[in-house]
Image (cartoon, grey):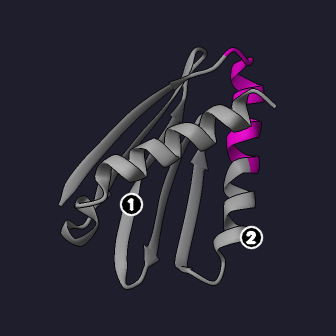
Amino acid sequence: MSKINIDIPHNQTQEQAVARVKSMLKEAKSKLGDKVTNLKEDWAGDTCSFSFSVSGQHISGTINVTPTYISVEGNLPWALSLFKGQIEKAIKEHAKDVMVR
């Protein structure tokens, strides 16, 4: 298992950032619905616990929205750890894009 830890700065209010993250997750569900199974998202205030499966590989983690950044922490199964750099890069690029809309 490999850990990912990504911090993405934002210049929104914390509430706006939470709304944008929720929107991003909803968009991801619709775009990846045929590839992702067992998708769970549980919000407690400004923190989201998530889990899902891709190609039989289980991924879980948290998204924490602070007043200045979004922190994504997760666990990648060994089979996906080979792509850790690419996964982190894709998350950063997509999150930055969503935060400047």
Quadrant the C terminus occupies: top right
Can I make out residue 45 in this image?
no
Q: Residue at x 60, y 49 (%)?
A: 43
Which quarter of the picture shows residue 79?
bottom left
Can I make out residue 98 in this image?
yes
Position above or below: 57 against 71: below
Does residue 8 appear left or right of residue 28 in this picture?
left
Q: Is residue 64 magenta?
A: no
Which residue occupies the foreground of this view, 86 or 46? 86
Mark 2 touching mark 1, by CB under 8 A? no
As drawn, the label of residue 60 is 1
Mark 2 and mark 1: span between their CA atoms?
19 Å
Q: What residue type is labelled 2?
A: Ser
Q: Which residue is drawn at 70% across and 49% down?
A: 24
The main secondary structure of the magenta stretch is: helix
Q: What element carries label 1?
A: strand
As drawn, the label of residue 20 is none
Q: Which residue is drawn at 29% across and 56% down?
A: 75
Of the image marks 2 and 1, the number of the one nearer the N terminus: 2
Which residue occupies the foreground of this view, 15 or 68? 68
Q: Which residue is drawn at 32% across and 47% down?
A: 85
Residue denoted by label 2: 30
Q: Give the range drawn in magenta.
A: 11-23
